[in-house]
Image (cartoon, grey):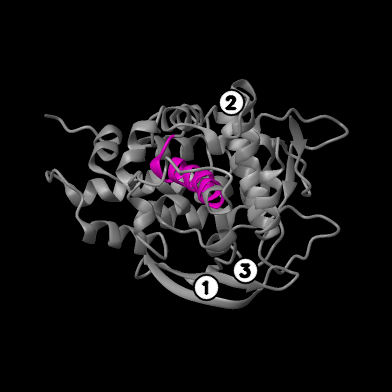
Amino acid sequence: MIATANIKNNVILYDQHNWKQEFLDEINEATAKSYARIFGITAGKEEDKRKDINAFTLEELEEILFDFQANNRNTIESYARIISSYLNWSVQRGYSKKNPLADLRPDDFEKYLTNEEEYLPERKIRRYEGDCVNAQDAVILRLLFIGVGGKQMSEIRNLKKKDVDKTNKRLRLVNSLKEDDMGMPIKESIRYLDIDDRTLNLIEKAIGQTTYTKKNGEMEENKHMRSFTDLVSNDYVIRASITKTDECNAPVDKFVIYRRLQVLAETLGIDGLTAKYIQRSGMMYYANQMIEGEQELALDDLKIIADRFNMKSYHNLKGFLNVENVRRTYPTNN
């Protein structure tokens, strides 16, 4: 029997006894939506086997973990934790006898990775930057790659001309912890990041750009629509196009960053070009510089990289930032 979860975005669940809905009703709405999405994926296997996932054997649960086709350990661990929380709940309620996933350790999830994620080496980032018609786009790639980001891309969005110390090659970065309706930071944290000549050069070009070419130059101009737009003139490095409704003297919306990345992905033919992917590629670059001839990535190395990318904990790096992935991205000459 298939039932529909009673949450904002309907997801079809295999819920013969209404157990999953009972489980979802006991957690907050945002978490429930996330969990329901995973249960929507497992529903196909449950329907095929005609039983709830809480009755699956370890081998049957492993089929589901493989079916996720996860690229990194953090992702598959997250999915497994969601399933495991439901299995634990089922045991507590007496709906099942045991949770077969309970004994899995973090390293055990490596075997369920079906696609090894390939990260972008720095030379490819340079090439893509060169393929950007707009310096406003190229600088986003570079900033993400070197560790600039923040909550909802706020370190990039808040970056002003005055934050660029050309003499000392350093950026003052403002991470918005809370914003007002205009996107201005109400609560913030500030840090400083050293940059190289290439980053500084791209920032200066982005500051000097006054018009923005649409679709990375692949849009044909006609009498009804121009192939470019005028950029707002303000103190920010990344600026939006002039519209009648936008507030000119405020940071760009985070979706401006995301849309520009999407357009670059489409026009340059780059699969999966997201902010997180670029940042992880940058982490590979810095890890490669640190380990050099070493055969392992030390704990201190992970902490340094986490600090550069303004991550609260280095633990989340362990799922993908390892010597194997670094060497796959930056092969040695040996």
Say few, some or many: other residues with alpha carbon within 10 Å of mark 3 (under 14 / 14 to 19 / 20 or more): some
Asked if residue 160 lies in the magenta stretch, the reply is no
Between 32 and 157, the one nearer to me in the picture: 32
Between 164 and 114, the one nearer to me in the picture: 114
Q: Which residue is mark 1?
A: 162
Answer yes or no: do the residues labelled 3 and 2 have beta carbons within 8 Å? no
Say few, some or many: other residues with alpha carbon within 10 Å of mark 2 (under 14 / 14 to 19 / 20 or more): some
Residue found 42% across the figure and 33% down from its top: 58
Secondary element at tag 3: loop
The first of marks 1 and 3 along the sequence is: 1
The first of marks 3 and 2 along the sequence is: 2
Q: Position of residue 79 (x, y in %)?
A: 51, 43
Residue found 71% across the figure and 30% down from its top: 219
Answer yes or no: do the residues labelled 1 and 3 have beta carbons within 8 Å? yes
Between 207 and 249, the one nearer to me in the picture: 249
224 versus 92 height, above or below: above
Q: Is residue 170 left or right of residue 21?
A: left
Q: CA distance from mark 1 to mark 2?
A: 56 Å
| Magenta highlight range | 71-89
Q: Position of residue 331 (x, y in %)?
A: 22, 32
Q: Which residue is mark 2?
A: 45
Residue found 29% across the figure and 62% down from its top: 303
The first of marks 1 and 2 along the sequence is: 2
The three-letter amino acid code for the residue at tag 3 is Asp
The three-letter amino acid code for the residue at tag 1 is Lys
Q: Which residue is mark 3?
A: 235
Residue found 55% across the figure and 52% down from its top: 89
The three-letter amino acid code for the residue at tag 2 is Lys
